[in-house]
Image: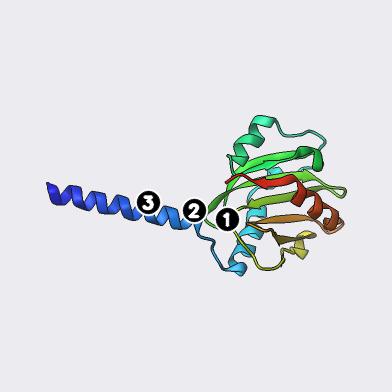
Amino acid sequence: MRTTWAMAASAAVAAVGVWLVMTFVPSGDPDRLVAAVQDHWYHEPASWVQTSSPVNTAALEMALSGSAQVDLDRLNVVSYARSCLVNGRWVPHLVVQGEAGPVMLLLLSRENVAEPLPLDLPEEGLHGLIMPLEEGSIAILGDDEESLESLQEDVTAAVEWTI
């Protein structure tokens, strides 16, 4: 009986250890991160809608799940907000309305990158990047016609990590 409990306790400790590593240790592979972000765009076509209707506050708060605060006054309309699994982590997925259409934002608080990583999907007419922050990073992906420079500044100023 004691052996069974000891084995169960060992398995539980191992599971918690794996969860801690998956949650708090950055992946470290920039190519894998880029591929995961690009792939995620294909999984949520319903988010890619041009609209003037903002997402409701409760959905935004649920998507952020205490990981970040977003100053909505610094961004155009946030029309979509969900928590999504990207690169093995649950991250806030927001869509803001840009000048040329919807723009996907993934708030990657646990993914540190040393330099901007391009996210281009030319076959879809999209361009973007994963931009490094002091801590974490933010993925931005929008229409080829979208000017991302000013959006990068707005997003950097609007997002504050809370974890």
Residue 100 pos. (x, y %): 86, 50
Image quadrant of residue 56? top right
Residue at the image position 54 percent from the left and 52 percent from the top: 89
Identify the residue under disc 3: 16
Q: Are marks 2 and 3 in contact (CB under 8 Å)?
A: no
91 relative position to 95: left or right: left
For label 2, the residue is: 23
Q: Which quadrant would residue 125 be assigned to in this image?
A: bottom right
- Give the residue furthest to the left: 1
Q: Is residue 30 left or right of residue 126?
A: left
Give the residue at mark 1: 110
Nearest to N terminus: mark 2 or mark 1: 2
What percent of the width, then of the height, locates residue 31? Answer: 62, 69
Q: Residue at x 31, y 50 (%)?
A: 12
**Mark nearer the N terminus (2 vs 3):** 3
Q: Nearer the viewer, residue 47 or 134?
A: 134
77 w.r.t. 110: above or below? above
